[in-house]
Amino acid sequence: MIWRISAVFALLAGPLWGASCEDIRFEGNRFTVCEVDLSQNSARLFWRDEAGELYGSFDALPDDVIIATNGGMYHNDRRPVGHYLENGTEVVRPITSAGPGNFGLLPNGVLCLNDGSAAVIETRRYAEERPQCTYATQSGPMLVIDGALHPRFLEDSDSRKRRGGVGVSEDGQTLFIAVTGNAVNFHSFGTLFRDALGTPNALFTDGTITRLFDRASGRADIGAQMGPILAITE
């Protein structure tokens, strides 16, 4: 059962943690959107622990995690597909060339996380400028690029799947995590970030395998082991 959010807990989560998830409807589609105030919470990535063991699931995360979701695409052995930076250490370099699948549908992008701020940056710009990031994960395609939808998105596309993505407010202080409640195309998903959430840049993180953990509502989607996990901590 995916749709289990409690209105009481949702109202409490905002003031208490500066982060809350809410089920919404937008243009006929269902979404769960989590809004995170980065002045009150930390956003980071979890892939392997200090012993080199894969986190892989929400259950393995620290107790102070309040929201979590897939942190980008990964191979069968759970290695990140694209650029991955954890606590300042680069695990995978930025991949700037086009390729197969959604990841290679350029432009793709990088989610850059620092203490108190975040940014979604187009990959080639990221590779050229090399901004300071404590954590970073590459995925694709970009959903919104400087206020515009990805140029390859078609409004009437029949490629409809469950999807997950992230976007950041213009001032970099608010991180939005969204997962779909029904199958949508990329155009509809990008429009959510651009028009409903007002994020100038947003990034697709993964499709059918996307899952969400929300402590306040008790939601903890189950499935196969994950690669990188994006988590919000108190």
Image: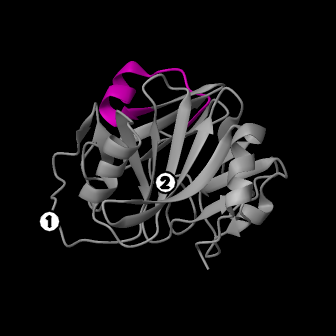
Q: Quadrant of the N terminus?
A: bottom right
Residue occupying the far bottom of the picture: 1
Secondary structure, mark 1, is loop
Which secondary structure lies at badge 2?
Answer: strand
Q: Are marks 2 and 1 in contact (CB under 8 Å)?
A: no
Please state the horizontal and vertical placement of residue 20, each as a whole percent of the image. 65, 48
Residue visible at 36% across and 36% down?
Answer: 201
Q: Look at 29% across and 72% down and name the residue there.
A: 160
Q: What residue appears at the point 71 percent right and 30 percent down from the top-left corner?
A: 40
Percent x, y of residue 4: 65, 71
Q: Is residue 125 above or below residue 162?
A: above
The image quarter containing residue 194 is top left
Residue 194 is a magenta residue: no
Q: How many marks?
A: 2
Over which residues does the magenta segment extend?
A: 120-136
Residue closest to the eye, 23 or 232: 23
State how far apart marks 2 and 1 are (Cα).
21 Å
User: According to the image, label 2 marks what residue?
Assistant: 178
In which image quadrant can residue 154 be found? bottom left
Circle 1 sits on which residue? 156
